[in-house]
Amino acid sequence: MTLAIKPRPSLESQHFQVVIIGGGINGVALARECARAGKRTLLVEQNDFASGVTSRSTRIIHGGLRYLEHGEIDLVRESVRERERLLRERSHLVHPVQFLFLLNETSQRSAMKVRAGLWMYQRLAGKKSHDLSEMELKRVERALDAGHKWSIFNYEDAQCEFPERLVAEWLTEAIDAGAVVRNHTEVLAVDVAHGRARAVLLRDRSGTGPSKDERVEAGWVVNCTGPWADRICQRSSVRTSKPMLGGVRGSHIVLPRFSGVPSSALYAEAADGRPVFVLPWNEQVLVGTTEVADTGDPGRTSPSNEEIEYLVRTVSKLFPKAKLSAQDIKYTFAGVRPLPNSPANKPSAVTRRHFLHDHKDDGADHFISVIGGKLTTAASLARECARKIGITVGEPTSVSVGPGGSLDPMLDQEVIEIARAGSVSEETARGMMEWHGHRAMDIARMALVSAELRAPVCPHTSHIVAEVLEAYRRECAVTLGDVLLRRVPVALGACWSESCSREAALRIGAVLGWDDHALGANLESFEMERAAFLHRPSRSYSALQTAAD
């Protein structure tokens, strides 16, 4: 089976009731909302869907325990409501996680304050956390620095290990509802005439679209570009009284599993009192995050040596017996949070609430910029934004599950049926359920067509080439990076290396009909994208740290 990628039809002079710029989780959620309401909707993303802030987050679906410290009760209430909805509707992607809140005698927060905060947090969520067994708590205590006296509190939140997959599902639901979507398509400017946004000027960079720039008419334009929001306004000569955003970089390190690391997630304090998470993730350990002002290009941001040292030092002080250093890091990544501009406040004190900036007073009616937002509240932000532009949207009262929706990966009978349908292993069937929900059965049936489709993407994974074909056919993947970093994100795994990249490209290229030139070009662009996203600490830094140790 081969797949020919169809050329994209021209959008020149077409009219859309809503044009959304930015294909992160907020933009995709809004496109789905507008399309489901029957509005002719266009979603445009300069790179790939979920390739910006969405894929560079800490991957927690949380109610915002930290927001209680700043008195943002309404935001916590909204967050826990949306968290519970995601747990019900997308149980294959979003799952509950036990968190341990760690305090010792040097902590800046008191045990009484934390206990009160957790009590309120549970009340707002309307549920009580399950207590960990005494054996598990003792095991965690033994692994922690024995030089401190630890107080350990547990609570429940949730994790979405792969928000890229959540975006892919919402994207296909938006398309099924009638939305037109374009990734790898840059908005050069919003055309504002006579005090109103009239159109957008597009440039398709996918290699499959029109060779000339296109002008698309719009009833409303919504700027969901996150940290790029001010840049869109500048390009369009829409002048705000002050910058809308105050970019704050959050960096993470990914470590291999190490001796003593608990199966629960940890919420701990760094030396400066900032909260840092240590999370089980993708058979590895994710540690983050930092808060550093960043006004540079959001697409080129990367962790500084100081941030890497900060995170390594924090986790090393928690688990000194593990003897961790920068040399243990698998990779690092960073994203710029699109927080509201608030120069008088420390980054930690800036609200995580989202805002809708109406540009009517800036001389651009029917143009709105979304400021802020987070994974947990993307759906509620989309509903609010849809109402802002005149679309009637009610609050969901029941669980709404789309075609790719909720399916419990632990249902053994479902796993067996999928394995039989595709003639694949139960491990592969379970992996497909975890990433594709009910679509897993369709992918399994497609895999039955040939041994090439049932082959693993690389020798170290149970995910198969049929999932890649689905990404190209239904989920708008254009490049190898779109697939291996986001739709079937095996390249985020612990095993991945340049040899895995080559093997994956060969297996995928055989199914897609790539010649040697196409294979080489796809592989080269993928390695460049992966290296720009997932950084290894520089050799000079690792050597300096080793010498210091």
Image (cartoon, grey):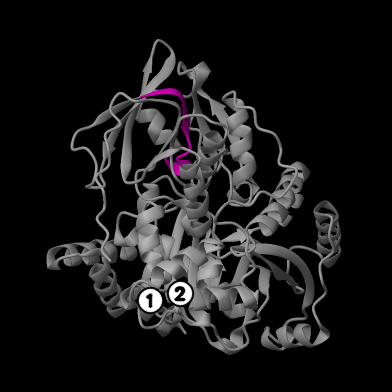
Disc sitting over residue 364 in the figure? none
Answer whether labels 1 and 2 touch (C-beta < 8 Å). Answer: yes
Give the residue at x 40% y 61%. 470
Residue 429 seen in this snapshot: yes
- Element carrying mark 1: helix
Q: CA distance from mark 1 to mark 2?
A: 8 Å
Q: Quadrant of residue 269?
A: bottom right
Residue on which disc 1 sits: 454
Q: Specify the segment rendered in magenta.
A: 217-228
Residue 100 picture location, percent across and down: 73, 72
**131 left or right of 34 in image:** right
Residue 282 seen in this snapshot: no
Is residue 226 positioned above or below 318 on the image?
above
Q: Residues within 10 Å of mark 2 (few under 14, many from 20)?
A: many
Residue on which disc 2 sits: 422
Residue 391 picture location, percent across and down: 60, 27
62 or 212: which is nearer to us? 212
**221 falls in the magenta region:** yes
Residue 286 picture location, percent across and down: 54, 71
Is residue 366 positioned above or below 254 on the image?
above
Give the residue at x 63% y 34%. 384
Is residue 547 positioned above or below 86 on the image?
below
Residue type for callout 2? Gly
Q: Quadrant of residue 438?
A: bottom right
Q: Residues within 10 Å of mark 1 (few under 14, many from 20)?
A: many
First in residue order: circle 1 vs circle 2: 2
Q: Quadrant of the N terminus?
A: bottom left
- Camera-side mark, 1 or 2: 2
Is residue 39 positioned above or below 438 on the image?
above
